Image (tube, grey):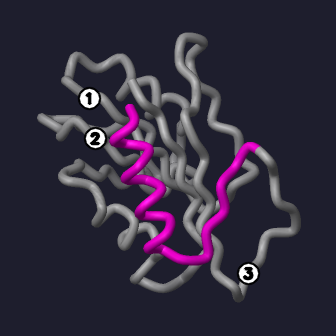
């Protein structure tokens, strides 16, 4: 399973940058994680997006719930707005890529080598599309 993380630019606006990025995917199922400790998976698409994971009651539990499900999920995208939070993954899994979307009004205090930073949603969308094709 491919696991990607996207840190959305901090924003109070309804039109977060992540929505423009997700438009590049053919299909996905998005689950709102804010104030949740579990989700009802139902019959998700092959790509599952856990949105607002940083505001979940049990982020690691939600990740494990998706990874341990019997559904045919091939890609998991973790979406948050705080790039320095660590979301532990079970040992057999690793993060394929960490994309950080940057709003020029709120530049990060530091840039890390293990992350890809984008100011432009079109470029980030292309990067995400290339990552999903390569998997």
Q: Which mark is residue 106?
A: 3
Residue under pointer 2: 47
Q: Which residues are magenta?
A: 114-135
Q: Is residue 82 left or right of residue 56?
A: right
Q: Which mark is residue 73?
A: 1
Q: Is residue 116 rendered magenta in the image?
A: yes
Q: CA distance from mark 2 to mark 3?
A: 29 Å
Question: Mark 3: which secondary structure?
Answer: loop
Quarter of the image for the C terminus: give it: top left
Q: Is residue 44 left or right of residue 131?
A: left
Q: Position of residue 134 (x, y in %)?
A: 39, 36
- What count of labels does the image hold? 3
Q: Position of residue 57 (x, y in %)?
A: 53, 44
Which class describes the residues within 10 Å of circle 3: few (<14), some (14-19), or many (20+)?
Answer: few
Could you tell me if the residues under marks 3 and 1 are in contact, i.e. CB atoms within 8 Å? no
Q: Is residue 130 rendered magenta in the image?
A: yes
Q: Which residue is more in the foreground, 59 or 17?
A: 17
Could you tell me if the residues under marks 1 and 2 are in contact, i.e. CB atoms within 8 Å? yes
**Dot placed on the residue nearer the N-terminal end, 2 or 3:** 2
Which class describes the residues within 10 Å of circle 1: few (<14), some (14-19), or many (20+)?
Answer: some
Q: Residue 18 is drawn in which quadrant?
A: bottom left
Q: Is residue 84 left or right of residue 71?
A: right
**Dot placed on the residue nearer the N-terminal end, 1 or 2:** 2
Question: Mark 2: which secondary structure?
Answer: strand
């Amino acid at each position: 399973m491919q696991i990607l993380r996207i840190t959305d630019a901090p924003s109070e606006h309804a039109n977060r940058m992540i929505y423009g990025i997700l438009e590049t995917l053919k299909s996905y199922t998005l689950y709102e994680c804010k104030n949740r400790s579990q989700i009802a998976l139902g019959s998700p698409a092959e790509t599952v997006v856990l949105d607002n994971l940083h505001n979940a009651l049990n982020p690691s539990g939600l990740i494990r719930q998706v990874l341990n499900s019997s559904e045919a999920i091939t890609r998991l995208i973790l979406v948050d707005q705080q790039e320095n939070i660590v979301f532990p993954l079970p040992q057999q899994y690793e993060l394929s890529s960490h994309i950080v979307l940057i709003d020029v009004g709120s530049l990060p205090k530091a840039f890390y080598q293990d992350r890809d930073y984008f100011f432009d949603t079109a470029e980030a969308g292309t990067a995400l599309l290339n990552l999903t094709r390569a998997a």
